[in-house]
Amino acid sequence: MQLDAYRREAEAFVSEIGLEHYLHFAGRKPSLEIESIYEAHAGLFTPQAVESLRDSGNRSLLEFCVEGLIGRATMRESALLAEREAALELSVEGAALPFRRAAIEQASEPDPSRRAEIEAARLEAVERELNPLHERTLERTHGLAEELGWPSVTAMCDELSGTDLAALAGQARAVLEATDRQYERAIEPIIRAEAGVERLRRSDLPAFFRAPSLDVHFPQDRLLESLTGTLTDLGALAEDRVTIDAEARPTKSPRAFCAAVQVPEEVYLVIAPHGGRDDYETILHEAGHAAHFAHVAPATDFERRHLGDNSVTEAYAFLMQRLAAEPGWLARRLGVEDPTAVVEHSRAAKTVLLRRYAAKLGYEIELHDGAGDPATLRSSYARTLSSAMRLDWPEAMWLADVDPFFYAARYLRAWALEAELADELRESLGPDWFAEPEAGARLRALWSEGQPPTASELLGREPDFTALIAELLA
């Protein structure tokens, strides 16, 4: 195999499919037309290509090839899932509500009973319309991993990612133990303030994260201004390369995302604003991705521009996201005089998310080991998440809540890495490091290198959770 030729075609594929994902999930087109893209580049994703890349020793390209082969084999299910999500309408109190709009409506709904009704309608739609497609995708993925020579998807992802998933799951269990004692004590007063209930239910989580009591600190009309000001301070405003898509559309995905279509020349930051603190954290997070990709050196090889360990770009995204709870940033950008409530809410929300992903990783290892039947796995999912979150977690999400190829592991490692990066910036440049030109210079230098094959390259060792746990328990 000629690796340079493979890289060139791989980059063309990534750009074409990235643009297609942007157009569909931004609500600009109703269908997700990925099948023709996969077919046009079918030679990238064959068992023969897998074997050649194994022999080459290029793990990043091998991981890309294997994931692409599985993506090609399940592309019809992926397209159908996206199209059904876009077309689905829920019936809530006799009124139609677009499926993709439901999460936003749920977050902004002040009535706990109506939030529960929206949640029930969403879960019923997931169970009826989406889970059959998720199950077909899962079965095909497990079968392909075995055909390619791995005993399970877990073993496949462990090898391809260079991450010891069992060891990371052990660290995740330690995180759950470390935060267990203060978890409910930290979130209960915020639940009462934000969700209007004494005891958190899953249907109240969107309102908990939405945090309406903090809206006074996060005016909607300052959202884009605060972002561009922050990026300007860091010397990272790349208007010629980054397009911010914040326009409301009925079928736009409620989940914000960054589409790096061509790195560094064409990057899209997509958000469906619904108001408040959550919008600020979300847009800053996606701006971290966008700034990273827009500042990669153009001469960097394809693997570092588009592939590598996504824990790295997620760490940069979390680093930007944390600004929405930094007292100095809140004062500088939004005129917040007393940030106490914002800081406390941010810590509680981060703890909730961290515990959720720590629990998810253990469940996903069980799921992808391939030994359990659906009934057992559904029960295990609900039990595992209920225990970590201290609320009744529905079985219906046992597949819809799973990102492909253990992306939960990327998030966990990213949180650990980001906490260490933030500590280093604070210690060397002060609490308002984000306004220091030196911080921008350091970040741009890191961003210019793209993504290394593993996050440990940035630290010279594997990231651990010491700094993150200390931050959450402060």
Image (cartoon, rainbow, N blue to C red):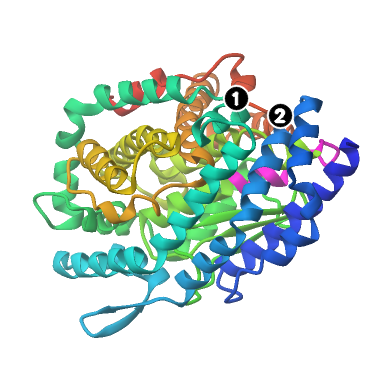
Q: Amino acid at mark 1?
A: Gly
Does residue 264 lie above or below 415 as drawn? below
**Res. 296 visible in picture:** no
Q: Amino acid at mark 2?
A: Arg
The image position of residue 271, as x and y in percent, is 51, 61
Instruction: Tell me, yes or no, whether the two marked residues, 1 and 2, touch with CB atoms within 8 Å.
Output: yes
Disc 1 marks which residue? 162
Say what secondary structure mark 2 lies in.
Answer: helix
Task: Give the residue at x 53% y 60%.
Answer: 224
- The image shows residue 110 at horizontal and vertical percentages of 20, 67
Label 2 Cα neighbours within 10 Å, binned few <14 / some 14-19 / many ≥20: some
Disc nearer the start of the sequence (1/2): 2
Q: Residue at x 41, y 76 (%)?
A: 88
Depth check: 258 or 240 in front?
258
Of 163 and 226, the residue lying toward us? 163
Number of marks in picture: 2
